[in-house]
Image: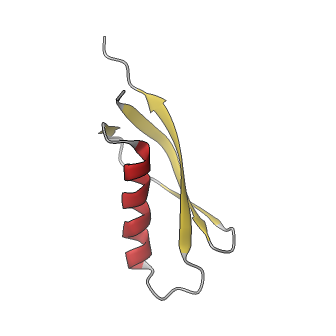
């Protein structure tokens, strides 16, 4: 797996509202699906009981190449 950085991350609610979030710049080595699931789980737990829950995460990534 090629390591990557996330350049932008957005949470999408059930009604279609887009909420941009800012992550600290980290290099990820896990599969993107796993990272997105962790982000969604974290924000879903914080907003438990909300009328407009988060249902999807969109991430833009950039590969990190070693020199």
Task: Count how many numbered circles sit on residues in the image.
Answer: 0
Q: Nearer the viewer, residue 28 or 34?
A: 34
Q: In which quarter of the image is residue 18?
A: bottom right
Up the image or down, 3 lies above or below 24; here it is above
Indicate the position of residue 6 as horizontal and vertical percent values.
Answer: 45, 41
> How far across and down, in percent of the image, does residue 58 sit?
56, 52
State whether residue 59 is above or below residue 15. above
**Residue ID at (43%, 84%):** 48
Q: In which quarter of the image is the C terminus?
A: top left
How far from the left and from the top, in percent, is residue 30? 32, 41
50 to the left or right of 39: right
Q: Is the residue 46 above or below the residue 11 in the image? A: below
Where is residue 10, by image quadrant?
A: bottom right
Q: Give me the residue at 44% from left, 64% from top.
A: 40
User: Does the image show residue 23?
Assistant: no
For this orientation, the residue located farthest to the top is 67
39 versus 54 height, above or below: above
Quarter holding the N terminus? Answer: top left
Instruction: Tell me the residue at 44%/74% (across/down).
Output: 44
**Side of 51 relative to 24 (left or right):** right
């Amino acid at each position: 797996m090629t390591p990557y950085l996330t350049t932008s991350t957005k949470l999408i609610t059930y009604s279609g509202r887009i909420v941009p979030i800012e992550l600290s710049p980290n290099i990820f080595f896990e599969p993107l699906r796993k990272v997105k699931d962790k982000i969604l789980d974290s924000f879903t737990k914080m907003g438990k009981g909300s009328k407009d829950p988060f249902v999807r995460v969109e991430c833009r990534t950039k590969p990190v190449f070693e020199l």
